[in-house]
Image (spheres, grey):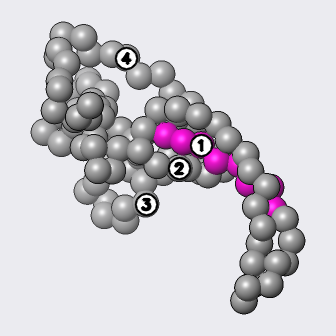
Amino acid sequence: VMVQSADDDPKTYPYWYAQVLGIFHAEVLRLDNGQVKGIQHIEFLWVQWMGAEPHYRWGRKIGRLPKIGFIVENDAFGFLDPALVIRACHLIPDFVAGWTLELLNT
């Protein structure tokens, strides 16, 4: 999926990408000063974040789409409000670039 970047710097890439690993919903208690104020239905996505390759040149003038890849393991997974999703997207795999053992240690 594709979401708007939270970074305000105009030089940074304007979107973040994530691979959806799970779609969940939960009934949670809303608390106010320790008092239960009601039950709220919450929907959320469990995602693996992806980011733009930092040294890859892309753009309309050179006729290349941005190159997206997995990010380092400390920030690789998270939760996302489905309302923040701009759209689903299909990423074209770059099999020529090979694969790595450096990102997620098992």
Residue 9, position as x, y percentages in the image? 31, 64
Residue 92 is marked as: 4
Please give the range of residues in magenta.
40-47
Return the disc, 3 or 4, that comes first in the chain's sequence. 3
* Mark 1 vs 3: CB contact within 8 A: no
- Position of 75 relative to 38 (above/below): above
Which quadrant of the structure image shows residue 50? Answer: top left
Residue 86, position as x, y percentages in the image? 58, 42
Q: Would residue 22 be visible to someone looking at this image?
A: yes
Which quadrant of the structure image shows residue 77? Answer: top left
> Secondary structure under badge 3?
loop
Q: Residues within 10 Å of mark 4 (few under 14, many from 20)?
A: few
Q: Amino acid at mark 4?
A: Ile
> Secondary structure under badge 2?
strand
Residue 45 is marked as: 1
> Which residue is identified by label 2?
79
